[in-house]
Amino acid sequence: PGCSTLAPPPSHSSKPAKPSRQVVLQPGHSPLDWARLSGHPTADLRGLPRGSPYLRVTPAMLKKMTGRRGKDAWTVMGGKVYNISPYLPFHPGGEAELLRGAGRDGTRLFGEVHPWVNYEGMLAACLVGIYVTEEEGSQAPGGGGGAASGGGDMEAMD
């Protein structure tokens, strides 16, 4: 009778959790709002003239698209180039965090921060084109130069 078989309560000596890096988003900029906007059948968030073909984006082209000086912010993930400008106000970690990948290949950075997120589905309406080498970018599919290589179209957008 004076003996208890219950174990003593566990001690709470573990480290406190890191504070969240999330920022307060403006009303209408939740993940559900982004899904509604980007998933709309007519959504085209590429920042290119409507109906434009996908571009062959070279490192030199990508490097210019940093989100600064009035330019859109583009990033590469998995060999595909996305215009992340429309997503900036929706990013739970804040615009500055997302812009860390602008103008460069953000595949590794994205994978380190949130490998569970399906960026292809989330950014499908923002797909600009594929990432190619400078040499590949100077050749149009089929071997002949021209706008399909992306060079002429990109200069016209400036």
Image (cartoon, grey):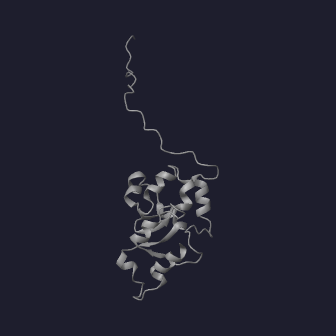
Q: Residue furthest top?
A: 2
Q: Residue 51: horizontal and vertical position, in percent?
A: 58, 78
Between 120 and 152, which is closer to the camera in this rendering?
152
Between 1 and 129, which is closer to the camera in this rendering?
129
Q: Residue furthest front?
A: 69
Q: Residue 122: horizontal and vertical position, in percent?
A: 52, 61
Count of all numbered marks drawn on residues in the image: 0
Q: Residue 153: horizontal and vertical position, in percent?
A: 51, 78
Q: Residue 73: horizontal and vertical position, in percent?
A: 50, 62
Figure quadrant of the N terminus: top left
Residue at 50% x, 69% y is 127
Between 122 and 107, which is closer to the camera in this rendering?
107
Between 13 and 100, which is closer to the camera in this rendering?
100
Q: Residue furthest right?
A: 27
Can you say whether 63 is above or below 134 in the image? above
Residue at 52% x, 50% y is 92
Residue at 40% x, 65% y is 78
